[in-house]
Image (spheres, helix red, strand yellow):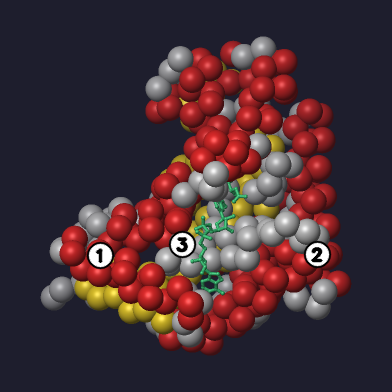
Amino acid sequence: MAQTPVKVTVTGAAGQIGYALLFRIASGQLLGADVPVKLSLLEVPQAVKAAEGTAMELDDCAFPLLSGIEITDDPNVAFAGANVALLVGAMPRKAGMERGDLLEANGGIFGPQGKAINDNAADDIRVLVVGNPANTNALIAQQHAPDVPAERFTAMTRLDHNRALSQLAAKLQVPVTEIKKMTIWGNHSATQYPDLFHAEVGGKIAAEQVDEAWLRDTFIPTVAKRGAAIIEARGASSAASAANAAIDHVFDWVNGTEWTSAAIPSDGSYGVPEGLISSFPVASRGGRWEIIQGLEIDAFSRERIDASVRELVEERDAVRALGLI
Ligand code: NAD
Ligand code: LMR
């Protein structure tokens, strides 16, 4: 019997990440080369026509695995029966906007979308939030979906993880495949902490193979501020690399991995307050993320993890004060 297609909902489908993402999902790279998919594209009313144009192009690819495309501006329709939700559409920061304004504007998007997921999605729904501020947007959506297991709401730090792999590989002149156990801790923001004290290259700790000044003054800021550097160079934020990371995150969540980075709800591990959606070293087993336990955290790492987690606490407190969660 033919396999039932997996319904994948993409919000912000007419945006630049959407354009880099949809064709890869339809070609089988999100879930596997033998898994049929049905796409649901959610957009704001004024961008529905552009999404229709992208859908025409998807049709024109004649992807064997793509069993249908739906386009809507109604979250209840978009998330009805959804198995995977990629929440990409968000309110970008505009000139003169304070941090609170940004959180409030995004609360107006991610709260209702969380509720629509709660009321309409399939029982096995998995949610990845890409739209910034991703960790706190994921928290807002999760708090509006009390019937969905909390752990199904995640935020993307895989792009930061991939950036860290690439920077270290270039420094040590090794293929990225030589690097194991890379970790991004904390928030998807400039406070994130890319950790070389647990990463291994050729079986040896990465931090011992680079000098401390490079690690502290070049590696960490380059990874943490890479998003801003791309905006400066391209005049637009990262799109293809963000879409690629979203594919990596969901593929590994569904198909399993022994070690990567993802922002998932904290269970209190490593001193991160329970419930915060913070990046950890994770494995995926049986379709569930698990925080890798038992790592020793030295003083250098502790200070940086704490700083990023503090920022997440501040964001959570700000959205709480605004009545968004
Ligand atoms: P974009 O502006 O090109 O596209 C965003 C799209 O979202 C637009 O088409 C807009 O109409 C749509 N949208 C806005 N509100 C919506 C809503 N309520 N429902 C459905 N759609 C809605 O932006 P982009 O470059 O595609 O980036 C999207 C987001 O991803 C941004 O917030 C960006 O900062 C973020 N981002 C995150 C990462 C990460 O690593 N987590 C990396 C890159 C970009
Ligand atoms: C990125 O890391 O590339 C983005 O989150 C940057 C941004 O502000 O959209």
Image spot of residue 171 (x, y percent): 53, 17
Sequence-first tag of 2 and 1: 1
Classify mark 3: helix, strand or loop: loop
Report how far apart the C-alphas of labels 2 and 1 lie in the structure.
38 Å
Classify mark 2: helix, strand or loop: helix
* Residue at 13 percent of width and 75 percent of height: 1
Q: Are marks 2 and 1 in contact (CB under 8 Å)?
A: no
Question: Residue 130 sits in which quadrant?
Answer: bottom right
Give the foreground label among 2 and 3.
Answer: 3
Farthest-out residue, left: 1
Which residue position holds label 3? Answer: 15
Which residue position holds label 1? Answer: 58
Question: Is residue 282 something that shows in the picture?
Answer: no
Question: Is residue 219 something that shows in the picture?
Answer: yes
* Residue at 25 percent of width and 75 percent of height: 68
Identity, as a three-letter code, of the amino acid under mark 1: Leu
Identity, as a three-letter code, of the amino acid under mark 3: Gly
Sequence-first tag of 2 and 3: 3
Image spot of residue 279 (x, y percent): 64, 49
Q: Residues within 10 Å of mark 2 (few under 14, many from 20)?
A: some
Report how far apart the C-alphas of labels 1 and 3 lie in the structure.
15 Å
The vertical placement of 247 against 171, above or below, is below
Of 296 and 56, the residue lying toward us: 56
Report how far apart the C-alphas of labels 2 and 3 lie in the structure.
24 Å
Relative placement, left or right, of 276 versus 255 is right
Sequence-first tag of 1 and 3: 3
The vertical placement of 324 against 275, above or below, is below
Of 45 and 300, the residue lying toward us: 45
Classify mark 1: helix, strand or loop: helix
Which residue position holds label 2? Answer: 100
* Residue at 63 percent of width and 66 percent of height: 91
Image spot of residue 76 (x, y percent): 49, 86
